[in-house]
Amino acid sequence: MFCIIDEQIHHGPVFIQEPFNVIYSENSEKAEVLLNCIAKGFPLLHYGWKQNGTDIDLSMSYHYRLVGGSLAINNPHEKQDIGTYQCLVTNSFGTILSRKAKLQFAYLENFEAKARSAVSVREGQGVVLFCAPSPHYGDLSFAWIFNNNPLYVQEDDWWFVSQETGNLYIAKVEASDVDIYICDVSNREIKQSVQGPPTPLVLRSDGKVFFKKNIILI
């Protein structure tokens, strides 16, 4: 009769999951950030964490706690917690250090209270209205307000709002397009919006541009 005994294979730690970059909003309904770290190895693994290259004191149980090997940060604050994190895993066979993961805090500042100059264009000509968003961190989305009403832009050959820069492109300006434009910026991370200063669009009186079969006649 043979007796089969299950034996663990002894080896040093190997990562199964390493932390990745996190964007956190202090307005978030979640009062905790979780930086993931999972490893395998035998014998028993011990986890630690570094912030900006310095060992984190995990005895600060009111602020940090380990969930397995992952690091949970309670009520994160930008001044204290922003930075680069790494997971440290050790057993008797050795130590491994994870890739760096950044914890950033989303924000969106108000535009400067500075009037913008009018943009002049000939009727029938194209124009770009610049948004120039205020300082921010996190994913933004852009829209425009025209004459105090939301501008519903159907992106086609004539109208386009860049979701990279926020700029409004009008390929062919008509007299009805002349008025006040305002760039509306939303930060998806913190669910906050700000509006830029008004930009007047005016027609020049020194001529008119016509389009005909891709030929411009002045």
Image (cartoon, rainbow, N blue to C red):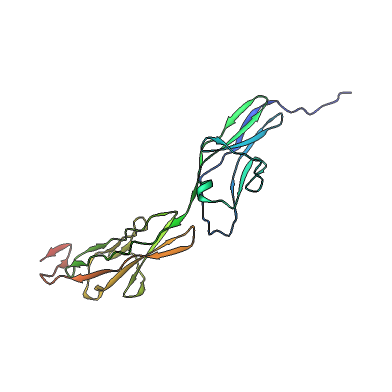
Q: Based on the displayed image, in which of its 4 quarters is residue 11 positioned?
A: top right
Rendered position, 180 above or below 75 = below
Rendered position, 78 above or below 108 = above
Left or right: 89 with respect to 103?
right
* Quadrant, the C terminus: bottom left
Residue at (31% x, 66% y) in the render? 197
- The image shows residue 46 at horizontal and vertical percentages of 67, 33
Q: Name, please, the residue furthest toward the right.
A: 1
Rendered position, 74 above or below 129 = above
Q: Based on the displayed image, in which of its 4 quarters is residue 31 positioned?
A: bottom right
Q: Based on the displayed image, in which of its 4 quarters is residue 112 positioned?
A: bottom left
* Quadrant, the N terminus: top right
Left or right: 203 with respect to 67?
left
- The image shows residue 56 at horizontal and vertical percentages of 59, 38
Left or right: 49 with respect to 179?
right
Q: How many marks?
A: 0
Residue at (40% x, 64% y) in the render? 194
Q: Closest to the observer: 114 or 3?
A: 114
